[in-house]
């Protein structure tokens, strides 16, 4: 009987050890799966962040290009206005000179206005 009790206890110990081994293997497998899932999630987050940064950079470039175009247009308009003013002033000066020349010629021939 004593032997039977010892055999039963030994069987229980072996069974417990086998169960412990199974639990340990399951825990290892779950840990591996958790690591793989975490790595996959990290890869996904990196890809999303990379795309987000790319989109932000593209938007910043578009914004900068828009501001540069507005500035360029303003400078072009300012330049056009300055050129027009210069032409108008030159035309006015030419007209005054022409009037002066005509006045002198007419005064030489005694046709005063």
Image (spheres, rainbow, N blue to C red):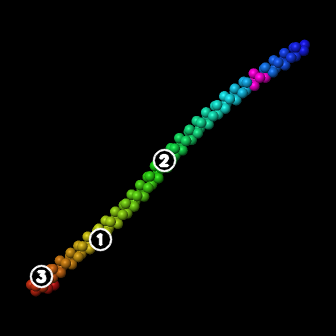
The secondary structure type at the circle numbered 1 is helix
Query: According to the image, label 3 marks what residue?
Result: 105
Q: Nearer the viewer, residue 13 or 106?
A: 13
Q: Is residue 52 above or below residue 17?
A: below
The secondary structure type at the circle numbered 2 is helix
Disc 1 crowd rating (10 Å Cα; few below 14, some 14-19, many 20+) is few
Which mark sits nearer the N-terminus, 3 or 1? 1
Q: Quadrant of residue 26?
A: top right
Disc sitting over residue 55 in the figure: 2
Q: Nearer the viewer, residue 17 or 111?
A: 17
Tell me where the magenta segment starts and ends, as one range: 16-20
Which mark sits nearer the N-terminus, 1 or 2? 2
**Residue 112, position as x, y percentages in the image:** 14, 85
Disc sitting over residue 85 in the figure: 1
**Residue 97, position as x, y percentages in the image:** 19, 78
Q: Quadrant of residue 73?
A: bottom left
Q: Are circles 2 and 3 on residues that touch, CB within 8 Å?
A: no
**Residue 35, position as x, y percentages in the image:** 63, 34
Residue 111 visible to an observer of this rendering: no
Q: Image quadrant for the C terminus?
A: bottom left
**In the current view of this chain or complex, which residue is farthest to the left?**
109
Q: Quadrant of residue 32?
A: top right
Disc 2 crowd rating (10 Å Cα; few below 14, some 14-19, many 20+) is few
């Amino acid at each position: 009987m004593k032997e039977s009790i010892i055999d039963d206890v030994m069987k229980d110990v072996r069974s417990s050890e086998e169960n412990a081994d199974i639990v340990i293997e399951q825990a290892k497998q779950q840990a591996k799966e958790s690591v793989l899932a975490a790595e996959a999630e990290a890869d996904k987050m990196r890809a999303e962040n990379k795309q987000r940064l790319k989109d932000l950079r593209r938007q910043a470039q578009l914004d900068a290009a828009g501001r540069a175009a507005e500035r360029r247009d303003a400078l072009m308009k300012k330049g056009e206005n300055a050129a027009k003013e210069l032409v108008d002033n030159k035309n006015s000066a030419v007209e005054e000179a022409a009037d002066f020349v005509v006045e002198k010629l007419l005064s030489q021939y005694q046709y005063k206005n």
